[in-house]
Image (spheres, rainbow, N blue to C red):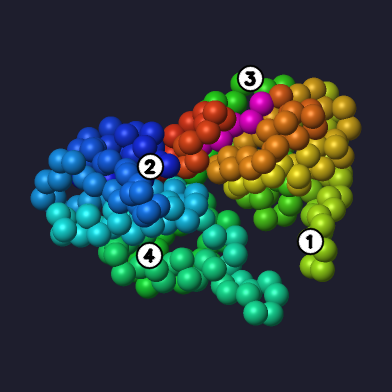
Amino acid sequence: MILPGSASQSLGAALAAELDERLAAVEYERFADGELVVRAADPEPADRAVVVASTVSGDAHVELLQLQDVARQYAEEVVTVLPYMGYARQDQAFREGEPVSARAVARALSPGTDRVLCVDPHERAVGEFFDAPFEALAAADRLAAPLPDLVDPLFLGPDASARGLARDVRDAHGSGTVDHFEKHRDRDTGEVSVAPSETDAAGRDVVLVDDIVATGGTMSEAIGQLESPAHVFVACVHAMLAGNARSRLARAGVDRVYGTDTLERAETAVSVAPTVADAL
């Protein structure tokens, strides 16, 4: 039985089809006082219930806790799939007096599940915060499928940590070179500067690859350092695209943004359901 959160309905349906398992009819409501409730309209006993919920907001976290509670009532095993784990980037206290928010979230989610699968968390070390068995799933290779025909492609990570993601997409695509930018963040101001790559991008199709694009600021700055590329594409597992990120990337010269269904956006071009299904 697959139980989808309200932010992961498409992925829940895709996963049910991939596994040939029943997709529960889940209803999402808000009471007059603002409290949320989820309801499985057609629950049935099952050996396993898979809760699929991207935690994109505080409400989504509450929904997930409620779905776990429903799942526990009807299934012997509860597996929680976090297509996108909110607060995963707050994996340490950056200033004195701050919480480690990723740890707080993980501790809240652990009691309601027997196992956790998380698609490309920003830092894999967040798995150590969970009391339940945790597995990080790599889905960047799925981003190769929707890419157009590329001319002498260059796959770039916006920083060194994203180079492996760029390599995964290049390997799945089958050709091209891999490089990355050097990124420096000022710990006091939070401002990010990007040093240009030494790889020549002139006349080439460039694919910038990252796990998440939030505001588009780092990507836009990186694109501005490229010399005369033929086309520029952005491929990201989690296309958060907050605020004016879409227009910011367009102004920077991006032809198209490709994302997965870990976050359901207009830019969603491919599903991570096969990756999750393999892990289940």
Q: Position of residue 262 (x, y in %)?
A: 47, 42
Label 1 SS: loop
Amino acid type at mark 4: Leu
Question: Could you tell me how far apart the alpha carbons at marks 1 and 2 are, in whole angstroms?
Answer: 33 Å
For label 3, the residue is 149
Query: Which region shows up in magenta?
Result: 256-260
Q: Marks 4 and 1: in contact by CB < 8 Å? A: no
Q: Secondary structure at mark 3?
A: loop
Can residue 189 be seen here? The reply is: yes
Whole-percent x, y for residue 11 in the image: 38, 37
Q: Nearer the viewer, mark 2 or mark 4?
A: 2
Q: Please name the amino acid that badge 1 sits on.
A: Gly
The amino acid type of the residue labelled 3 equals Asp
Lateral position of residue 44 relative to residue 20, left or right? left
The residue wearing badge 4 is 109
Q: Which amino acid is tagged 2?
A: Ser
Residue 133 location in percent, x, y? 35, 66
Report how far apart the C-alphas of labels 1 and 3 lie in the structure: 37 Å
Total marks drawn? 4
In the image as oriented, which residue stretches furthest toward the left? 45
Query: Which residue: 83% across, 50% down?
Result: 194
